Image: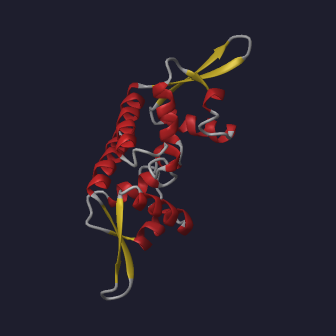
Amino acid sequence: MRDGEFFTSIGEGRTIALLLALKDAPAPLILKDLLPVMNHTQTLRSRIDRMQSEGLVNVDVVLETHKKVAVSLTDLGKEAALLFSMANLSVSPGKELKEKSLDLKHADPILRMLCGKEYVVQKDIIGMLHSYDTVIKVLSVMEKDGLVIKVDNRQGGWEIRYSLTSLGRQIADVFQTVHSKISRP
């Protein structure tokens, strides 16, 4: 299930933080101004390139005394940043974004996988993402944030099921909305 249509830059971790940093900036930011959000230059550039290909940001090369890469939000990026800003305010209000599940790697596909379903079995989530440790970490933080609940089901075999809470459904709807806008041809 790891196809390009299901996975976007939003599920890669720290992308929401980049969107919010650009939203709060009074002018386009140069790439080095985004390093406090994502402190690895190659990863940052790769993420910005992917966000550009999805229509979330504009990237302009500015030639002054030195070549600079200026990054700004597109209209779609502004809309996504606004939606994620509201979601950020709803989830664990006393915490910083970096402490929340919203911006963790794989939070996006997990929330969208749970969206509209009564529950999803943990092994199916792990099977989609191929990383047991990461899935367990993200689901644990989502549970602490009040987005999911975990149920151990011992009927007919032992399995762990995850369901969205009412807050989780609202947040999953935000992720689904942004995903559908990014995925439009």
Farthest residue, direction bottom: 156
Q: Nearer the viewer, residue 94 or 20?
A: 94
Quadrant of the frame with the C terminus:
top left
Residue 149: quadrant of the picture: bottom left
Question: Where residue 93 appears, x then y in whole percent?
Answer: 39, 44
Residue at point 29%, 59% (across, down): 165
Residue at point 47%, 40% (across, down): 16
Whether residue 105 is visible, yes or no, is yes
Residue at point 46%, 44% (across, down): 10
Residue at point 52%, 52% (across, down): 105
Q: Nearer the viewer, residue 56 or 145?
A: 145
- The tally of labels here is 0
Q: Nearer the viewer, residue 183 or 143?
A: 143
Farthest residue, direction top: 64
Question: Where residue 47 appears, x then y in whole percent?
Answer: 57, 39
Whether residue 185 is visible, yes or no, is no
Question: Where residue 144 appears, x then y in whole percent?
Answer: 42, 59
In the image, residue 74 above or below residue 120 = above
In the image, residue 118 above or below residue 94 = below
Residue 64: quadrant of the picture: top right
Residue 136 located left or right of residue 111: right
